[in-house]
Amino acid sequence: MTDGDRPPALLKVLMVGEVYGKLGRKVISVLLPQLRQQKQLDLVIANGESAAGGFGLTSSTAEELLRNGVDVITSGNRLFDQREMVDWLKNNPDAPILRPLNYPPGTPGRASLIVETDKGPVEVLNLNGRVYFNEMDSPFRVVDNWLEGRTNTMPRLVDFHAEATSEKVVLGWYLDGRVSAVLGTHTRTPTGDARLLKHGTAHVSDVGMVGSYNTVIGMEVEVALKPFTSHTFVRPKQNRRADGPLVFNSVLVEIDPENGRAVTISRLDLMLEDESM
Ligand SMILES: [Fe+2]
């Protein structure tokens, strides 16, 4: 077989679930650098909207993730929980940090970027769902505008940050054949529905999270219980102590770089014992 007959090497993209707080960042620093090597990853995307103590992102937490093997940080409805990000994004327009495209006009930050990889350029887009997020524009309408004038052969991945599984599944089908992958985040609960849609778009409803396992999606169980048992509001509190295993949820997507179609999608979920931290 000559080189010319050989199918192109597939582009390997790892989408990491929402990194939650300090423990989530530690898991990234322990696992991701070696995972990049082992899996020969071309691109790593991670959702970082809860990386700063479970509430938004700061410049230092973003830099920590970028230092430890993340190429692009996506976000969602809580990116601006830490107010410093408003000015920081204005002052650092080239940072590889995305906010959803359908935030109101005038919101700081950018929603997409093109990364040059060894297998060619790849574009990453961040979108937010509208169910329970009335302040956002329709993701369906804004993504149509965004795609206008773009070829559908460049690999493109969308982090669709949304609450409702229905909206996430429907957006996957809406973009089937128009982007390489639609990967859900926000619920921090990994779903078992990773699959290829009919026209070559990889989809999963939720990638999951990175952080402390014996929690309610990163929060202390006792605190998370209170609103349900006492009907009083309690400010959510992140679990700071690793009193059990730590979880790393992600999906690996392989894409044909020549036509942008996804070839495989599989879950890559790992656990770390707390002693290793
Ligand atoms: Fe969110």
Image (cartoon, rainbow, N blue to C red):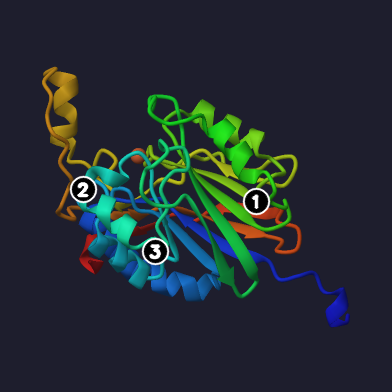
Question: Going from the N terminus, do you reach mark 3 or mark 1 first?
Answer: 3
Label ID, residue 87: none
Residue at left offset 17%, top offset 41%:
220
Q: Categorize mark 2 by other alpha carbons within 10 Å: few (<14), some (14-19), many (20+).
A: few
The residue where tag 3 is placed is 95
Residue at left offset 68%, top offset 51%:
150
Question: Going from the N terminus, do you reach mark 1 or mark 2 first?
Answer: 2
Secondary element under disc 1, as helix, strand or loop, is loop
List x then y, in percent, for residue 147. 64, 45
Q: Is residue 240 left or right of residue 171?
A: left
Amino acid at circle 2:
Arg
List x then y, in percent, for residue 68. 35, 71
**Is the N terminus in the top left, top right, bottom left or bottom right quadrant?**
bottom right
As measured in the structure, the alpha-carbon distance from the residue carrying label 3 to the one carrying label 1 is 23 Å
Question: Going from the N terminus, do you reach mark 3 or mark 2 first?
Answer: 2
Quadrant of the image occupied by residue 58: bottom left
**Is 46 above or below relative to 166?**
below
Q: Is residue 49 left or right of residue 121?
A: left
Ligand 1, what quadrant? top left
Residue 57 appears in view:
no
The residue where tag 1 is placed is 180
Amino acid at circle 1:
Ser
Report the front residue among 98 and 145.
Answer: 145
Circles 3 and 2 in contact, beta carbons < 8 Å: no
Q: Residue furthest bottom?
A: 2
List x then y, in percent, for residue 275. 21, 65
Indicate which label's residue lies in the foreground, 3 or 1. 3
The residue where tag 2 is placed is 83
Report the front residue among 104 and 200.
Answer: 104
As measured in the structure, the alpha-carbon distance from the residue carrying label 1 to the one carrying label 2 is 33 Å
